[in-house]
């Protein structure tokens, strides 16, 4: 036999980067979705080496769900894609299970074949009700509609860049096996910048960063983090919906690359007692009329009045937002002041214990950094909530003489605040507010009410990014 039986699409990394950057540029330029749809469907029809299209969406808690559609089926059925919403936690009830799935054609990605397999491309989807209207628990749609409205009404572009930390642990599916293994095993004990070029952590970072670059992330820097086996790979800011999509893709590609290295990429906020936890510091800015609206060289810490008002609204709503930014039992371990925890409800240019930091910046880079977001937060929900409250929320009445406020140190108080908040009800609607609070209560009730000092098996295995149907029913 002189030729292989299968010939599926495999694109070199430099060409992948060009294709994905071009697709991102069209999203940023807001090229008409119908035009992009026509281009993409023609491409899929003409490219014989593509076998399947992965359509993905996020549930209410921020887990990525992926459906692989045969390419030929997708092309003829794209306007009538459905799935069982009752199988997704936080989505529809069993009696009203069918939901629709629309393809967001501009959010199209070519994939590294050595990481995701040959012959596949990926596109994000929009969850719809049976009648074709937007589904209320699809927070990606909330974010997209809000930022589009800001652009149309005010000319604002909402920009974000997420600094996502994670851990690499030895062995596949280490989180699911946490109870039987009685903990996690580091792949290296090197620290901040100290991992050698050939050690397992550096090999993982190199491979993941290459895949990230090929998918159009516009890489900036990557490095081991403070804790053993901890990593961070940074990339440039972009429009908010793209940034949130990139959070999902970042975690997906990290998990896939780690699996190929017989390891597990974990985004638990505090997986190991006694070392620094992981965060998802989120840098945010707003541009309008071609200029950065957060910059004022004469303003305090280089931030404009517009920017300081944005910060003030977020700080005012901090207790309401706490569950959104720290959405798991385990995330409240990270809010420990002994490990550089950003748990103080204040803004500062220098104090990294502050919920919001004002980094050094200029006319191009001025921004605010929300540091209290855990890496397991739903990025669509978190980024949407911060931008909407930052731009449209309530300003505090004046300078407060109250003592320094702290974010909650446990999920139970955060759930109670969230569930009773009129701010959250106006932000998300009563149905989504109630669904989200219920999901978090179900998770919390399977875990010890008092955290103690040791990581408990339940807070790992019932974590929303870890549990599956089998684990959830082992009670």
Image: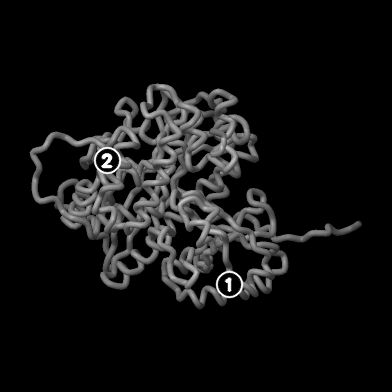
Residue 84 is left or right of residue 378, and the answer is: right
Residue 364 bears which disc, if any? none
Residue 74: % across, % down? 64, 69
Viewer can see residue 443:
yes
Q: In which quarter of the image is residue 237?
A: bottom left
**Which residue is at 30% across, 43% downward?**
322
Residue at far right of view: 1
Q: Which of 176 and 312 is in front in this view?
A: 176
Callout in the foreground (2, 1): 1
Element at badge 1? helix
Please, is residue 213 above or below residue 128 in the view?
above
Q: Which residue is drawn at 44% across and 43% down?
A: 376
| Residue that appears at 65% across and 75% down | 76
Q: Where is residue 140 in the image (x, y as percent from the top left)?
A: 43, 59
Disc 2 or 1, which lies upstream in sequence?
1
Residue at 64% of width from left, 51% of height from top?
116
Other-residue count near label 1 (Cα within 10 Å), few / some / many at <14 / 14–19 / ≥20: few
Residue sitting nearer the eye, 263 or 201: 263
The image's mark for residue 355 is 2
The CA distance from mark 2 to mark 1 is: 44 Å
Quarter of the view holding residue 399: top left
Q: Where is residue 354 in the image (x, y as percent from the top left)?
A: 25, 38
Camera sees residue 296:
no
| Callout 2: SS | strand
> On the image, numbered disc 1 is attached to which residue?
80
Asked which colour scheme the image uses, the reply is one colour
Q: Do the residues labelled 2 and 1 touch (CB within 8 Å)?
A: no
Residue 345 location (% of width, % of height): 22, 40
């Amino acid at each position: 036999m002189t030729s292989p039986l299968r010939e599926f699409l495999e694109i070199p990394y430099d060409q992948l980067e060009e294709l994905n950057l071009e697709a991102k540029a069209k999203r940023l330029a807001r090229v008409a979705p119908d035009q992009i749809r026509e281009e993409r469907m023609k491409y899929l029809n003409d490219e014989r080496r593509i076998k399947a299209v992965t359509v993905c969406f996020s549930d209410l808690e921020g887990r990525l769900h992926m459906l692989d559609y045969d390419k030929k089926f997708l092309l003829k059925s794209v306007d009538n894609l459905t799935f069982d919403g009752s199988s997704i936690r936080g989505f529809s009830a069993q009696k009203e299970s069918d939901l629709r799935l629309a393809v967001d054609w501009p959010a199209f990605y070519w994939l590294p074949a050595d990481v995701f397999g040959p012959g596949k491309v990926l596109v994000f989807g929009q969850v719809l009700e049976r009648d074709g209207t937007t589904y209320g628990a699809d927070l990606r749609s909330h974010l997209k509609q809000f930022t589009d409205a800001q652009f149309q009404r005010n000319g604002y572009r909402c920009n974000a860049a997420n600094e996502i930390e994670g851990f690499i642990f030895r062995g596949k599916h280490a989180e699911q096996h946490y109870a039987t293994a009685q903990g996690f095993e580091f792949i290296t004990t090197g620290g901040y910048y100290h991992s050698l070029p050939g050690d397992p952590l550096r090999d993982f970072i190199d491979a993941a960063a290459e895949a990230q670059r090929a998918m159009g992330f516009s890489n900036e820097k990557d490095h081991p983090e403070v804790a053993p086996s901890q990593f961070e790979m940074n990339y440039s800011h972009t429009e908010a919906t793209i940034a949130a999509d990139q959070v999902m893709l970042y975690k997906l590609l990290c998990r896939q690359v780690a699996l190929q290295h017989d390891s597990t990429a974990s985004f638990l906020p505090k997986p190991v007692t006694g070392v620094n936890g992981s965060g998802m510091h989120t840098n945010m800015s707003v541009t309008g009329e071609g200029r950065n609206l957060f910059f004022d060289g004469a303003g305090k810490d280089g931030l404009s009045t517009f920017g300081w008002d944005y910060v003030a609204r977020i700080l005012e709503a901090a207790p309401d937002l706490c569950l959104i930014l720290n959405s798991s039992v385990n995330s409240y371990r990270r809010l420990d002041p002994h490990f550089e925890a950003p748990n103080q409800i204040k803004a500062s240019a220098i104090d990294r214990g502050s919920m919001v930091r004002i980094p050094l910046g200029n006319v191009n880079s001025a921004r605010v950094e929300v540091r209290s977001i855990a890496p397991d937060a739903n990025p669509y929900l978190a980024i949407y909530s911060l931008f909407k409250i930052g731009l449209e929320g309530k300003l505090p009445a004046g300078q407060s003489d109250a003592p320094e406020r702290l974010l909650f140190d446990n999920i139970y108080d955060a759930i109670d605040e969230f569930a009773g908040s009129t701010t959250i009800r106006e932000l998300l609607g009563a149905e989504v507010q109630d669904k989200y609070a219920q999901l978090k209560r179900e998770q919390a009730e399977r875990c010890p009410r008092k955290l103690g000092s040791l990581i408990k098996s339940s807070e790992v295995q019932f974590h929303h990014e870890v549990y599956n149907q089998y684990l959830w029913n082992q009670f």
